[in-house]
Every structure is written in C-alpha cells, then in structure tokens.
Image: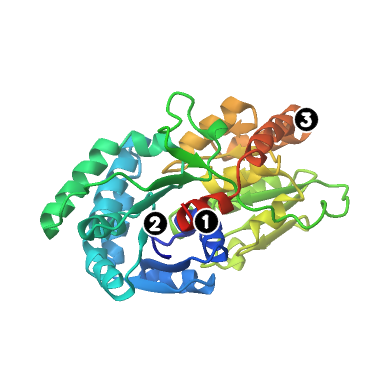
Amino acid sequence: MRILVTTTGSAGHFGPLRPFLEAIRDAGGEVLVATRTSSAEAVAAAGYATWPLAEPPAAERSAIFASTRGLAPVQANERALTEVFAGLDVHAALPGMFDAISAWSPDVVLSEAGEFAGRLAGAHVGLPFVKVSISQYAVEEELLEQTDAALARARDAHGLRSPDREALAHFTLMPQVLEQPARPGPPELRRFRERDARTGGRGLAHPDPLVYLTFGTVAPQREFFPDLYRAAIDALAALPVRLLVTVGRDRDPQQLGSVSANVRVERWVEQANVLRDASAVVCHGGSGTVRGALAESVPLAVLPMFADQPHNAARVHELGAGIAVGGIDELAGAVRTLLADERYAARAAVVADEIRALPTVDAAAQQLIDP
C-alpha cells in the first residue's frame, strides 16, 4: 500500500506523524511525505522520501503570524488557521500535491490536522483520507466552522469537487486524559502511543535534579529569542539543579552569552532520552513536549505563548501534573514546588499509566495495511 503523507513539516506538526510512519513502513507500506520546500530537507534527513511543495513567500506568512500578537488565543488561532494553513499554504501547495498524486499513484492520503491541501486534492480524485490530530481535539473543534469555510473558498478558487466521503480513519497520540473533558473528540477518534523505546533504567544518580527547559521549535524563530531564554535561564540557574536548555537547530547557543556551571545550552537534543532522567520540565506547552514529559511521569511548569499551548497548560494544571505559570517571575517558584511536592510527579505518573494502556502505533498501521 502506498500512503501519501502530507504535513506542513515543522517539528510540532511532523513529529506526531513519525511514530505512525515508522510503523506503516515496518508493516510493509510505502510512504512519501509531501511537505513545504523549506521543510523537505529536515523531513528527508529523518529518513523519508519527500515531495517538496511550493509555499507562499515567507514574508506573507510571517506578517499574518505577527498580526496575531496581542489577540485572544481563539482569535489568534483562527487567523493563523484560516489565513495561513487553510489559506496561503493551500493555494501554494495544491498544484504540487496533484503532481505528487499523479506521479506516485497513492492508495491513501494521510494528513496531519494542520495540512489541508492533501485532503482537498485527494478528495477531488477520490482517494480515501486518514487524519492525524496533533493537539487536543478541542483546539480543532472550536474552529471547525471557520476552517470549513476557508476550505470551501479554496475548493471554489481551484474548481475542486467537494469531499464525498468521511475520513477512512482518525488517529491521535493524545490520551483522553489530556483532552478537555467536555470536548474529548468524536467516537471514531482512535488513540495510540509510541512504541516502547526505553532500553534501560534512568541514568546514574546525581545530587542535583535535572530540569529541562525548552520552548519548542517555533518560539526561537520569533521575537522570543534571545530575551525570553536569557530571562528563564537567569530565573532558574540559581536553583540547586542541573539546567539543560535547548534553543532550536537554527539558533546559536552563544547568542545567550555566558551561563553558570550548572547550565548546559544545546541547539537540539533527543527529547525522549532527556526525559528519562529529568525531574521537571519547563516548557511552552506544546502538545509533543507535554505528552512526552507526562509519558515519563515528569511534572511540568508551563509558560504558554500561542496556538494550542494555553489549552495544554490549563489541562496540565487541572490534572495537578504541573503548574501553569503566567510569567518568568513565577518560574523559579513553580520549579521549587514541583521538586519539593511529590504529588505532582505522582499525578504525572497517573497520566503515564493511561498512556501505557493505549495500543501502540503498530495497531494503527495494521488497520491501514490490512483492514
């Protein structure tokens, strides 16, 4: 079976797809990833065949994202979703998406929830569609009407036929405990977890706990770098901890200046390996970071900025698996509390248990390859 995978390509969008794609390939499926030209190199470096898609000028995308600053989260998300992901990106990517379908003849289109050209092109030619949600379902649901309207405009502009079938399948890595209780998602949404990757126990004991500080991959490309990072380091370095900071592949750690002996700054690390030894995570509230930390029973201090992050921060706080903070001045106190009060780690472990109870992504691959 040939599966055309479509994604915007950023780490937060492509990352949740990778466990599924690995399982699909191991089950005998073929995978081609269609993504924006600016993301194709990183996707290819991860070991996947790619089909680069045209994209709108970076300045146009950046201007829309910049215009969301200061807006309420729902308004900011609506503008980014309808004007960029379901707007500019769709119009630029559709010709290349049809070329990929024509040249490669896939059996199925599998798209993450932020990429829309794949599902539109696939529906036009009658291909079945698989959706992979990458955040809380409530984040998608609150903007479904606006998204549908934007996609209707795109279909009209390109003369596309409307979809005539429901999604073949709807997958997510988000456990139900991290969903908003009032909006957990439709009945057909199937939940999975990554394969077990642990090869041993935690590392050697150390007198000072490890705190992992990450604001994801988008924040360092915006106005948050370097000032936010420097302020967070200054707030946390005085604690009796080992502080590991990542700033993204495109940023130079030297831009942060000198740091104390208990601080290590890297562009990028393998998050799963770090989380095995971390006692607390300080982060932005990205879905992958939150889910990954809680899967290892690590509590979080969450400083949300945009997109789905406020939703995740609120849910972590509600569960008692971490603390939602309102500013840098609250970080040190939050980390002290997480390290001193064992109840936070215990509640994170409850989430970890629910994640471990889910079937692995191999079950999702089997559903597609041998339904």
Q: Earlier in the sequence, mark 3 or mark 1?
A: 1
Q: Which residue is drawn at the image coordinates 22% and 68% (left, top)?
A: 95
Asked whether residue 175 is in view, the answer is: yes
Q: Disc 1, disc 2: CB below 8 Å?
A: yes
- As helix, strand or loop, the secondary structure at mark 2 comes to strand
Relative to 115, 25 lies left or right? right
Give the x, y percent position of residue 229: 57, 53
Q: Which residue is mark 3?
A: 342
Give the amino acid at mark 2.
Answer: Leu
The answer for how far apart the CA atoms under marks 3 and 1 are is 34 Å
The colour scheme is rainbow
Give the x, y percent position of residue 90: 25, 58
The answer for how far apart the CA atoms under marks 1 and 2 are is 10 Å
Give the x, y percent position of residue 93: 27, 65
Q: Which residue is mark 1?
A: 20
On residue 110, the disc is 2
Q: Which residue is drawn at the image coordinates 37% and 67% (left, top)?
A: 34
Give the amino acid at mark 3.
Answer: Glu
Q: Nearer the viewer, mark 3 or mark 1?
A: 1
Give the amino acid at mark 1.
Answer: Phe
Asked whether residue 326 is in view, the answer is: no
Q: Earlier in the sequence, mark 2 or mark 3?
A: 2
Q: Which residue is drawn at the image coordinates 59% and 53% (left, top)?
A: 230
Q: Does 310 sit above or below residue 65?
A: above
Relative to 205, 161 lies left or right? left
The answer for how far apart the CA atoms under marks 2 and 3 are is 41 Å
